[in-house]
Image (cartoon, rainbow, N blue to C red):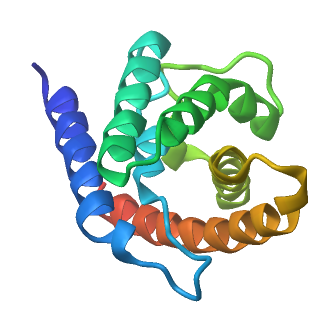
């Protein structure tokens, strides 16, 4: 195992523990419960194998589901954003072909990195809350929870990016 794999494993386990122990116990105003564990997908190297990311994302979401008793909702949402990660990145950057060897999330200009995080976070939360309520009559609750939780998760993610970028 190389250093990058060890760091990914530590991040994977650390984010699961952080989500389960701390963040799942936050329920601010009845709507805000941050899903910070998706930070793993943002930090996962772009040059790595996509199949590995899909498997890891599924298990990441599954572990959160097991401890949150949410029946596979997080696994489905996490797997989906891992699947659309590269097409979203291509559309945000504006290029069809990406230099996988040279590109990292940290080399993106801030507006593009922010847009990338916003798109994937909102998609994740929309799937989670849409599957949780699964009724058109609950669309207002789905929208409010998606909006508020996405804002809080994006703020946490961007703050974390600044700490990780300083470390590099």
Counting every numbered tag in the picture gives 0
Question: In the image shown, does 47 or 119 lie closer to the viewer?
Answer: 119
Name the image quarter holding residue 25. Answer: bottom left
Write the residue at 52% across / 85% down: 28
Name the image quarter holding residue 22. Answer: bottom left
Q: Is 47 rendered above or below residue 118?
A: above
Name the image quarter holding residue 165. Answer: bottom left
Q: Position of residue 91 (x, y in %)?
A: 81, 33
Question: In the image shown, does 126 or 86 lie closer to the viewer?
Answer: 126
Q: Is residue 44 left or right of residue 74?
A: left
Write the residue at 71% across / 63% down: 146
Q: Is 27 rendered above or below residue 97?
A: below
Question: In the image shown, does 157 or 69 lie closer to the viewer?
Answer: 69
Write the residue at 74% across / 68% down: 147
Q: Is residue 64 left or right of residue 124?
A: left
Query: Where is the N terminus found, in terms of image quarters?
Result: top left
Write the residue at 86% across / 68% down: 140
Q: Is 85 rendered above or below residue 116?
A: above
Q: Position of residue 168 (x, y in %)?
A: 30, 54
Q: Residue furthest bottom?
A: 29
Q: Residue furthest right?
A: 137
Q: Is 42 rendered above or below residue 83?
A: below
């Amino acid at each position: 195992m190389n250093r990058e794999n060890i760091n990914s494993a530590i991040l994977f386990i650390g984010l699961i523990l952080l989500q389960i122990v701390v963040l799942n116990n936050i329920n601010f105003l009845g709507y805000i419960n941050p899903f910070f564990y998706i930070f793993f997908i943002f930090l996962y190297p772009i040059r790595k194998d996509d199949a590995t990311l899909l498997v890891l994302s599924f298990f990441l979401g599954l572990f959160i589901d097991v401890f949150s008793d949410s029946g596979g909702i997080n696994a489905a949402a996490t797997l989906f954003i891992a699947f659309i990660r590269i097409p979203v990145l291509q559309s945000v950057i504006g290029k069809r072909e990406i230099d996988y060897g040279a590109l990292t999330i940290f080399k993106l200009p801030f507006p593009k990195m922010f847009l990338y995080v916003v798109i994937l976070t909102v998609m994740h939360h929309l799937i989670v809350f849409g599957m949780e309520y699964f009724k058109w009559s609950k669309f207002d609750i789905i929208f409010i929870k998606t909006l508020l939780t996405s804002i809080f998760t994006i703020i946490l993610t961007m703050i974390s990016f600044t700490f990780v970028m300083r470390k590099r």
